[in-house]
Amino acid sequence: MGTTDLHGNVFNWDYFTGAEFDDKDHNDVGLAKISTLVRQVRADRGRGNTLLIDAGDTIQGTQLSYYYAKVDPITGPRGPVHPMARAMNAIGYDAAALGNHEFDYGIPLLRKFAEQCDFPLLAANALDAKTARPAFAPYWMTQLRTPFGRPVRVAVLGLTNPGIAIWDKVHVRGKMTFPGLVEQAAKYVPRLRSMGADVVLVSAHSGTSGTSSYGDQLPHVENAAALVARQVPGIDAILVGHAHAEIAEYRVKNEKTGREVVLSEPLKWGQRLTLFDFDLVWERGRWQVESVGAKVLNSNVAAEDREIVALLGGEHRKVMAYVGEVIGTSVRRMMADEAPYKDVPIIDFINHVQAQTVRAGLVGTEYAGLPVLSQASCFSRTAVVPVGDVTIREVAGLYPFDNTLEARVLTGAQLRAYLEFSARYYVRTAPGGGVELAKLTNADGTPDYNYDAVSGVTYEIDIAKAPGGRITKLCWEGKPVVDDARFVLAVNNYRASGGGNFPHVASAPQVWSASEEIRNTIIAWVREKGTIDPAQFASEGWILTREGAPVFYSPLEHRPYKQCFCCR
């Protein structure tokens, strides 16, 4: 059995809404649900005939995991046991690969988490930078009894993601290196076979696509699980992670042996449990894998395990109280419902905090004099900052993703190309007549989070034009942006590492970065300032037009946008 990308989810609960988790497909999340499925499988197959592994990204992602990393950290003098360790120990995990997000809170916290787990954390391609020796256990082996008196030796090889060297370089630079998955699998799989392994499993925090979101910044492929299956002989199955995809069963033929390797990726956050079935036969004095099959079990058919709920109820209540804490007040109510097609204050707020944070980080550097722009997306159309008291939950709800902040330098020409790419989000709409909002956005399936609004400049998006020629009147401080102008863009790490495939940003010079999640940066800003006043940051930086005519009225002035607004 296998899980992956649990991202701090123990309960079927959304800490940002203060209610049970739900999505459009009515999925459920959390280890409490997974525990019930595991119990059912063990009862059906026999406890001694099953193993339970994970493919990484365990200790980051929810306010529950953040609380025990930052608010009441497990590394404290009398630090608690991490709730993910407590839950996984109670469920009975046998081994887990490390994900890239395991490194987000630093190596000391990761080491402490590893100490608290009753199972090994594996990463054959996480090496000590000085000795080139494994920084964590590369593999784990066990024996399963059989009715025939001949035990089956099973080996689990753990592989993590080379992108850690980029995404968490503030924590790992000079301390650890991360060679390629294929390279390290080719080293260890023959060793495991020579040690008598009858079954070789790989738990890989790496998707199947063969692509990398960080371009050519590293020589190693980010999503290499299928490459490992294809190029390294001797593997029977791979538990896949990292890509947040659902792959019940994917068969890849090994180039050297012609044998099929079965891959499976259960959906993130404990929404699915992968179940691999191995049929073995005794041949020529050893067990041989005759066939492998895989499927996924849906956690929404399972009740939460009462033992897990009771075990971690106290931690859950602590975090609920924490996210309900009032940290400031807002002068105005801000909503995100119109953010996909209007420049609204709630997105300006995100950009304001990001730009301020980057400016502070650039003080004293050669880039301090450059204009700082910022990008943000509408991550949730239901996000609201109420007038009056504002809680951690409401601020965190603006930024439900786990992105961190960095700064890249773009030229004026690159900025224009970036905005043109973003503007493909809109369906081409002829001038004249009304606009059907339900059909205006998400062109060609582009999700809301892949449309960026950029603050610090002003521009118009002409949706009557074809994508690629929509950005007009691009100005900075009232003057047209020239091609060789230089700007610092405050940008999230997902976008900066190639997420969404926006042009130029992934290869642009990085001049600053932080390991803190953006949502927690915003929370800290509200705590410090005390008051959110849109008058300090709300602007009319961009508008939609059709052949120069504004599509909507100004949300701030309740009148049509001026024809030329970059010079007002």
Image (cartoon, rainbow, N blue to C red):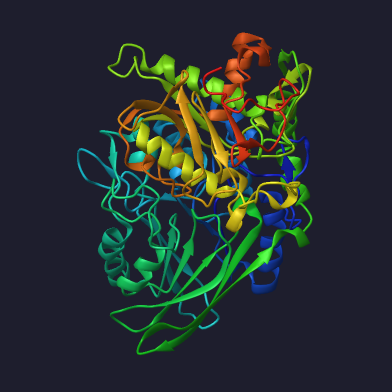
In front of the other: 22 or 29: 22
Q: Residue at x 38, y 50 (%)?
A: 161
Give how far across and how far down residue 191 sits, in percent.
27, 66
Image quadrant containing the N terminus: bottom right
Give how far across and how far down residue 251 sits, in percent.
47, 77
Q: Residue at x 72, y 26 (%)?
A: 555
**As drawn, 42 above or below 490:** below
> Would residue 114 be visible to someone looking at this image?
no
**As drawn, 22 above or below 204:** above
**As drawn, 518 above or below 296:** above
10 relative to 408 in the view: left or right: right
Q: Quadrant of residue 252?
A: bottom left
In front of the other: 15 or 522: 522
Q: Residue at x 67, y 68 (%)?
A: 41
Give how far across and how far down residue 432 sits, in percent.
71, 46
> Would residue 50 be visible to someone looking at this image?
yes
- Identity of the residue furthest to the bottom in this view: 284
In front of the other: 161 or 500: 500
Image quadrant containing the C terminus: top right
Q: Quadrant of residue 480?
A: top left
530 relative to 175 in the view: left or right: right
**As drawn, 197 above or below 149:** above
Give how far across and how far down residue 412 sits, in percent.
37, 32
189 relative to 239 in the view: left or right: left
The count of marks equals 0
- Identity of the residue furthest to the left in this view: 131
